[in-house]
Image (cartoon, rainbow, N blue to C red):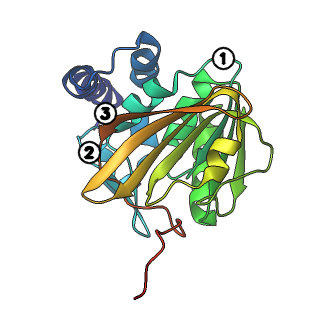
Amino acid sequence: MSSLNFDVVRQKMIESQLRTWDVSDPRVLDLVARTPREDYVPRNYRSIAFVDMNIPLGHGQVMMAPKLEARLLQELELKPADKVLEIGTGSGYMTALLANLGRHVVSVEIRPEFTADAAAKLAHHGIHNITLEVGDGARGWERQQPYDVILVTGSLPILPETFQQSLAPGGRLIAIVGKAPAMEVKRIRRLDARAFHEDSLFETVLPPLRNALEPARFVF
């Protein structure tokens, strides 16, 4: 598929998937239009880079469907001065989007091979306002906190309080919480040192992060 064809398919995806799923922020639409998602998907899935589906990355992890990526990006309300924490680098595509809208992105990935692959792609596209970390961020990542924005790119059966405590005042956290088939996209705002406000935005389903905190099991 030629570059011109990718441009056409990308624009069709924006019109048929993003706009019809309440993605209307012109900054997000413009960014998606000029970011080559096809360069971040695994090579054997490149021809379906813009299909409305999760794309397998291996090890049970996926690259989110385009409309979910864009909707989450919109709901984060990123500002140019924001310091961002991304849990789950994955393909590096969401990292690229976050880096284009925020000041700096710290992205944490448990699988070194994912980090290495994403690093090469991000460097190729001239994205340098990022710090890629290899580690387990499923229960929080306190290094370099506080953050203005936190995005968790895999689901969590339970949202550890560590994440919201890592927010700066005015900061926003988005995580997909619950177990299939009942998962909610939650946005938490830090109002001040002690107060938070939580919104339930919509439902979706996504594979869990490795080593995610599980609910306590009662034994009778």
The residues bearing labels 1 and 3 have C-alpha atoms spaced at a distance of 22 Å
Give the image quarter of residue 182: bottom left
Of the 4 image quadrants, the one containing the N terminus is: top left
Distance from disc 3 to disc 2, alpha carbons, whole Å, reads 14 Å
User: Counting residues from the N terminus, which is met first, the one under dot 3 or under dot 2?
Assistant: 2
- Check disc 2 and give the amino acid type: Ile
The x and y percentages for residue 218 are 43, 80
Tell me which corner region of the image, top left, top right, bottom left or bottom right, holds residue 139.
bottom right
Q: Is residue 135 above or below residue 105?
A: below
Is residue 35 at all visible to an observer of this figure? no
- Label 1 and label 2: CA atoms lie apart by 31 Å
20 left or right of 128 in image:
left
Q: Is residue 135 left or right of residue 22?
A: right
Secondary structure under tag 2 reads: helix
Identified by mark 1, the residue type is Pro
Q: Which mark is residue 80?
A: 1
Tag 3 near tag 2, CB within 8 Å: no
